Image (spheres, coloured by chain):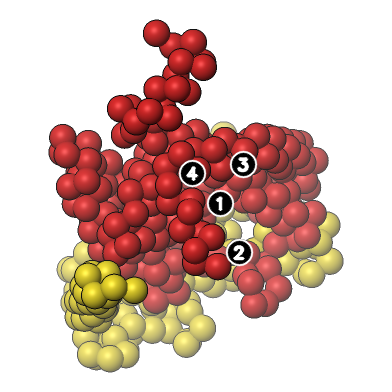
Chain colours: A red, B yellow
Amino acid sequence: MWKWLHSYADPQKAYKLSGTLLPWFATLAFLFIGVGSIWGLLFAPVDYQQGDSYRIIFIHVPAASMSMSAYMAMATSAFIGLVWQIKSADWAAAAIAPIGAVVTFIALITGAAWGKPMWGTWWVWDARLTSELVLLFLYLGVISLYASFEDKVLAARAAGILAIVGVINIPIIKYSVEWWNSLHQPATIKITEKSSMAPEMLYPLLINILGFGLMIGAITLIRFRAEILARNGMRPWVRELAKAEGVK
Amino acid sequence: MNARRKKRLALATALIGGVAAIASLLLYALNSNLNLFYTPTEIVHGKKDTGVKPEIGQRIRVGGMVTVGSLVRDPDSLHVEFAVHDAAGGEVMVTYDDLLPDLFREGQGIVAQGVLIEGGKLEATEVLAKHDENYMPPEVAEAMGQTHEKLDYDSSQKSGY
């Protein structure tokens, strides 16, 4: 099984595989986000206390949960790249970082926009909000470390170590609302017990979370392919590909 | 796995383990300082682990539920007074002179920031509504007997006189 997996460490094969996967991810992402958002924003019932303002949850929660998932994906790739010295894994980590940063930013902004009318403030320095902000800075650190070395093998090692060290922030974000008193409410969606949300609100939310995951996957694939081409510009297979595409 | 990879795997795992250990010690040491607010019980009886009580004149945040029936509104100004309690039985009076947030209701969770004054009262400069994790349509809430009415203002309060 490992032998089979190993063959995809080869840049050319990885490029081809991600090209095959891309349309699936992209189509499903459009479908899920479309259905989830329209259902959530137009047809889901209003909340008993917040009225229509709660609908930002259909963007905020998918963005926030995927910001953590994307970080785990990036750190896992960086770990594989660091230990097994697989360059494709390094490139995958570099491809995910900016997407994760944008999603984290979306989570912070939508949260602030909801916090103003509901809590009465844009921002408080409570544990959940602060740790999510630290996550954004971790992403920015990984991006800038990767960008600041000419030698991309060295760059990937430096950025990879930061990404792996930053993993410690993920459980802190997740459990911050349980370990400490915070203004941010605890999780609504629970895996082990019944979620504290009416099902007709929960389903579009879950669909959107899945859709955000697929969207991140699709954009990662696009960026991953670009990164492979950028790092292998001198390889014969890339030159042939360029010729076939009609690039001079 | 060859020897070099094994070494790198061990190094990377040690890195993660080390950082996790440092972070957990740090968080353990900072534990009580990472709380956004005191609960009313902690103000009355002191913190559970250290017994530290906030002093009079200290700037603190209090978080808890607004006691139903405790809200007193001054008819001539924005001044409000209400009690905040928690499940452990502590209760603290809060006074406030500004606009309350949308979600402020009796029975709802809030976080108030302000100065502790004589008699265990909090003179709040900021009151934030704390939302809980429950989301449901109004019909469901009604069926479950949840209160969800907004605060009532009589006509004299609305006109500002």
Residue with the mark numbered 4: A14
* Residue in front for this viewpoint, B17 or A183: B17
> Quadrant location of the N terminus of chain A?
bottom right
The amino acid sitting under disc 3 is Leu
Mark seen at residue A188: 2
Which structural element holds mark 2? loop
Vertical arrangement, residue A19 with respect to residue A195, above or below? above
Chain letter of mark 4 equals A
Q: Residue drawn 64% across and 77% down?
A: A192
Q: Nearer the viewer, mark 3 or mark 1?
A: 3
Vertical arrangement, residue B140 with respect to residue A87, above or below? below
Crowd tier of the residue under label 4, counting other residues whose Cα lies within 10 Å: few below 14, some 14–19, many 20 or above: some
* Residue in front for this viewpoint, A192 or B127: A192
Q: Position of residue A213 (x, y in %)?
A: 58, 48
Which structural element holds mark 4? helix
Residue with the mark numbered 3: A21
The amino acid sitting under disc 2 is Thr
**Upstream in sequence: badge 2 or badge 3:** 3
In this rendering, position of residue A194 left or right of residue A75? right
The amino acid sitting under disc 4 is Ala
Q: Residue drawn 25% across and 48% down?
A: A156
The amino acid sitting under disc 1 is Val
In this rendering, position of residue B65 left or right of residue B115? right
Separation (CA) of disc 2 from disc 3: 32 Å
Chain letter of mark 2 equals A
Chain letter of mark 1 equals A
Q: Position of residue A26 (x, y in %)?
A: 63, 35
**Upstream in sequence: badge 2 or badge 1:** 1
Mark seen at residue A61: 1
* Residue in front for this viewpoint, A200 or A185: A200
